[in-house]
Image (cartoon, grey):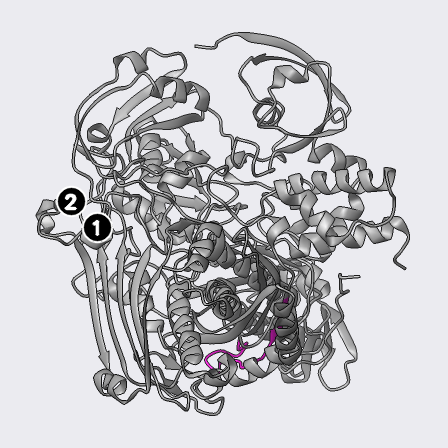
Amino acid sequence: MKIADDQPSGLTALDRPNSYIGRSVPRPNLARLTQGRGQYVTDVVLPRMAHVAFVRSPHAHARIKSIATADAKKSPGVIAVVTGAELAKVITPWVGVLTHLKGIKSAPQHAIAVERACWQGEAVCAVVAKSRAEAEDACTLVGIDYEVLAAVTDAETALDAKTPVIHPALGDNLTFERVLNAGDPDKGFAEADAVVETTFLFGRHTGVTNEPRAIVADWNPGEQRLTVYQGTQAPHMTQNLFAKHLDLEEHQVRVITKDVGGSFGIKVHIYADEMATAALSRLLKRPVKFVADRFESFNTDIHARDHRVKAKIGVKRDGTITAFAIDDLTGIGPFSVYPRTSGIEANQVVNLVGGPYTCPNYKARARVVFQNKNVMCQYRAVGHPIATAVTEGLVELAAAKIGMDPVEIRRRNLFADDAYPATGASGIKFEGLSHHASLDKILKMMDYQSLRAEQTRLRGEGIHRGIGFASFIEVTNPSAAFYGVGGARISSQDGATLRLDATGAVICQSGVTEQGQGTESVLAQVVATSFGVPIERVRVITGDTDNTPYGGGTWASRAAGIGGEAAWQAGKALRGNVLAAAASILQADPKGLDIRSGIVVDADSGRERMGLDEVARVVYFRPDSLPPGFQAEFMVTRHYVPRAWPFAFTNGVQASYLDIDIRTGEVTLLKHWCVEDCGTVINPQLVDEQIRGGIVQGIGGVLYEHCLYDDTGQLLNATMMDYLVPMAGEMPDIDIGHVVTPTKDSELGAKGAGEAGTAGAPACVMNAVNDALRPLGAKPITQMPITPERLLAALRGP
Amino acid sequence: MGERHIDIALRVNGEDVRERVEARKTLVDFLRDDLGLTGSHIGCEQGVCGACTVLVDDEVVRGCLVLAVQCDGAAVETIEGVSDSGAIADLQDAFQRRNALQCGFCTPGMLIGAQALLAQVASSKGGVPSREEIREHLSGNYCRCTGYQAIVDAIESVAQTRAGTKG
């Protein structure tokens, strides 16, 4: 029996009777999804809707000499064939830079390539037809004459003098560079008894959302409005950018996001083909639908994690870490992605390396370079998997070098649980973390000593098992420091509007969005608790810019912590307003009343006074019976943004137990553990499932996933047959534990939990592989994905 | 340009359907575009992800690997059909309570695959499939959200209940 029935938690720390905070209530929107009654963008059909397919560049870098469209235009079902130059008349290009990433540069990117294609898969021409199949048929009839240009593919040589510059106007192929010197790294290394220096290589991979990117854009010239059905994480952000680049006012654009078949950061960016679809709708005055096929997903969904990090750690014999140093190089494709830029991942790597540890000496350089491959940008746990693998890889290699247990070296260097507030070497600020309590808890959960004994015993039988750890920190609940200060119109604040309906139920409209993580359930729990109704009496509406308060949406683990707090405050405000009306009806003191389980009661005794349906009846239908001058307000809005801290850092630790087959090079994952501290846990089941899903996504990166390019910039494995993702058969069971350190920045105290799993999993699996390899005398593996081939090569030695 | 159309007659979720379809049209496109049965999803269009899983004459098939015209005379069952009939109500309930879905895009295919496994186990050896068997059986159904454990838990729980090994 693995399904735990939900139990009421009674009075919680948040001091509300019948609280739903901390309860695993099932999500209200699941029934329809299990019945196939979801409404994904791919399901949307509108009258007169046309379908667009794109002719995409087969070359990584090519000049477009001519485009012949006559044959395609004659193809059955074709409505229009539109080139980049033609579309540029209705949509302006964009440049993905932010002012707080000093020196970042990029070139204008068009909705459809004009004159030049800069990666294999960039759209070069659009064909709009009555069906997608007919549009694809006609795509094959578009004749494009290309002049193939030299492709810049290797990040290592992208800055060499003899390498062509992709955008000559920029002068070189450097997108962004950041250098950091903290403490005294040279002194730190000089004082070390041992120094470990190695290079970590991370394979470019991508999100592979089960539902591909999809959009239906509907320009209505009669209303002068653009309605966009879009699978996005940030409807208000895309509303703003559709308006900006189509020369509309924001209020002329409505973005509707219903069910989204997976996002993970893939669907938080501006994609040229989606902008083109909106522009085509404007041009053709009818709805146009674009759904990426899987080939298009692999070639155009943002990639991430393509980093080469030269890294160094100094350590004393007693385990004290004396210095960290990194040199990160990452190739991000031909454009910095709009509007969040492609500089953020490298910037995060610099911020986060060494993050769990007290060592103040840290030297870092990160360079971000252009290349003729698909674009890279922020994907779940942005930068964290890189920084954590580098840091934790170095820590375990250093422990091995000085002959210290990997747990012990962490104990001697992690920030103490009573050290907060504290500042990390890179300058990141921690309000309150629990590294040691988390480590204690995971060791107990995994029974570390017994596991080590089993490992030793089995080694005698020729079975090679490894145990690896990864302590980590995670950026959550971002303030304006993430994007707003750099000039991006991406909201860090979020709002919730509550309305009491005429039967005493509550409608909650929120600016955060639901991508399957359970946002709507969390909001319902929060509102039910703070206002005081059974959760069935709360209906949550998200994903519609016409009908929700302005907000940021879902990214950087912000929905529960920020959107949840806005809903919490709105619930309190509506309770006050409803009690004022009830007090007026009852001729009582509102301070003596409360709302519990949908009934107005005496706060002290709990005696029932009147139902919310009755309060609503009087206010809506018999306001004449209320005292003169009293006006009830049964709709309230509250907003929230973190102010005391730029980010609410969370922390945790993961551990992996695995088996390596020294004949085949295969890694079998036996068990995985995670202890995580995301502050107040609103719904334990949802948090645990975020972490489990995130861990498996991280396992994909460390063991399987890799976008393989040849040296001419051709993506070689753009199908799900060739690109390996984690499937059920290879994944382990994962045990989750929690330590709770609420943030004091909000009343709810919730921090984010969506990316912790992905942040730590690659590091601890890599460490476990190396733990298994170590007694065999193999060179440590620091390249991901750890394929059987690489594992066998490590065993064979140099 | 493949403009040949063919008349087909089949049963879909217990209803007779007669349509004229393009010969090249896949079963899942036919279900979604022609019949409005959007519960079957399209993920990879090459039989790897399992989002389009349906039953054709009680066999589990990938709707993207079968042409609609191949289903002439067949009985097709989709997530809409097994939902309305109540055949998988216990699995749907367990998926909801265990949060065995997040975005839900893979879920219709997962549920049809799970139902097939449980039916197969019940009619052969009986009892409850092991967690390894469940994982193996689901290895053609891709889920990016859950990490699979909750799905395995939910299916195991239903298997136990159906086998009478759980109170």
Residue B17 visible in rendering: yes
Instruction: Report the quarter where the C terminus of chain A lies.
Output: bottom left
Q: Could you tell me which chain the residue with mark 2 belongs to? A: A
Question: Observer-nearest residue: A273 or A447?
Answer: A447
Badge 2 element: loop
For the residue carrying disc 2, how many other residues have a C-alpha within 10 Å: few (<14), some (14-19), or many (20+)? many
N-terminal of the two: label 1 or label 2?
Answer: 2
Q: Residue at the spot x=84%, y=53% of the render? A: B160
Q: Is A585 above or below relative to A335?
A: below
Q: Is A265 above or below relative to A65?
A: below
The answer to whether A642 appears left or right of B37 in the picture is left
Prevalent SS, magenta region:
loop
The answer to whether A517 appears left or right of A55 in the picture is right
Question: Observer-nearest residue: B165 or A794?
Answer: A794
Residue A245: percent from the left, percent from the top?
26, 43
Q: Which residue is mark 1?
A: A370
Q: What's drawn in magenta, residue-wise?
A: A735-749
Residue A417: percent from the left, percent from the top?
49, 88
Question: Observer-nearest residue: A502 or A400?
Answer: A400
Instruction: Report the quarter where the N terminus of chain A lies.
Output: bottom right
> Disc number at residue A664?
none
> Disc number at residue A166?
2
Amino acid on which the number 2 mark rests in the picture: Ile
B62 in magenta = no
